[in-house]
Amino acid sequence: MKFRTSIWVVVMVLFVAGCGAPKVVTSYKKNAETAATHGNYTQAVEAWKQYIAQHPVEEIQGAVFAKAAQNAFQAGDNKLATDWYDQARYKDFSSPEMYATLAKIYRSQNNLSKELSALEFYTNHFSDVPNEIYSRLFEIYDEINMDNKAIAAWNKMNEASKSTVPHLDAYFELNKEKKNTEVCDSVSLVLLEKDPKNVDALEWNAQKYYTKAEQLYEQQMEKYNQNKTRKQYRILLQQLDQVTADFKKALPYFLKLWEIDPGKKYAGYLANIYTRFGNEKKAEYYKQYLK
């Protein structure tokens, strides 16, 4: 009887021990989730490590690895976050948060190709893409000279993002390369509203009006010199009014450029404008910078 009692006690101990082990394992997951809820991400990561160590990898769901990875990222451990996200991907798990976070990690590592892949996966597989995704795609496409994709990303950005000077500047330069004159005309003016000393936008408008005026002046003078009649002279005078108007539009832009960079680069333009105005004193002032 005593022997049977001893066996029964041993069996019960083993049964309780067997039932107790999973509860210990399960508590690690709960501890991790509780810690994360309270913003204790380092503590959450330690609990996730314990949980993952207690389970065969094949038994852990991709969503669990992704949750653990997000906490690792929040704790500042990008290496562990990437490893756990890789496990989630191997299990065919994906979510917007996962790929947005991966993109941030790759960006912090200056891994442009992987960052781009993560962002493109996001836009190709999820709806309701946030503006920051398209903004970053625009920056990357512009950087790697994928102009058409950059413009497509630009068209999906919100107005606030489009209105930042760095984005406007990049979009302006992109359209200059593609010779989209009308776009450059409008974007340059928006740029100058936000950044009055933007050299690229100032030069665009200065050159636009200067070239228009100078070409018209030369064309009409050539016509008059080939046919010096009263009629042609009247036409010349009419056209010269337009020449003067365009030079007057170009002048303020060149004067601002001169304030930024007084010297030979802009002196020739200013000297010529004042020569066309018949103001030789000011023309001579700028000509001295050409010597």
Image (cartoon, helix red, strand yellow):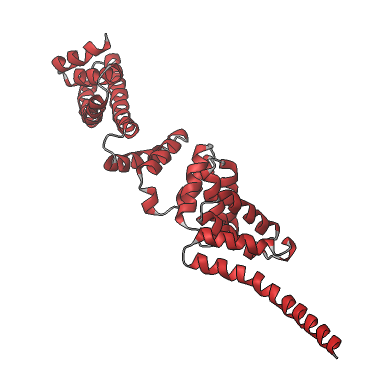
Q: Is residue 107 left or right of residue 21?
A: left
Residue 46, above or below 19: above
Q: Which image quadrant for residue 183?
A: top left
Residue 62 image offset from top left, x and y in percent: 66, 63
Residue 205 image offset from top left, x and y in percent: 31, 33
Q: Nearer the viewer, residue 285 or 245?
A: 285
Q: Residue furthest top?
A: 291
Q: Quadrant of the N terminus?
A: bottom right
Residue 226, above or below 22: above
Question: Which residue occupies 47% across, 63% down?
Answer: 39
Q: Is residue 59 left or right of residue 33?
A: right
Question: Which residue occupies 27% across, 34% down?
Answer: 197
**Residue 16 shows up from this direction:** yes
Q: Residue furthest bottom?
A: 1
Q: Quadrant of the C terminus?
A: top left
Q: How many marks?
A: 0
Residue 82, above or below 37: above
**Residue 126 shows up from this direction:** no
Residue 174 image offset from top left, x and y in percent: 45, 37
Q: Nearer the viewer, residue 135 or 146?
A: 135
Residue 3 image offset from top left, x and y in percent: 86, 86
Q: Is residue 160 left or right of residue 32?
A: left
Q: Nearer the viewer, residue 225 or 286?
A: 286
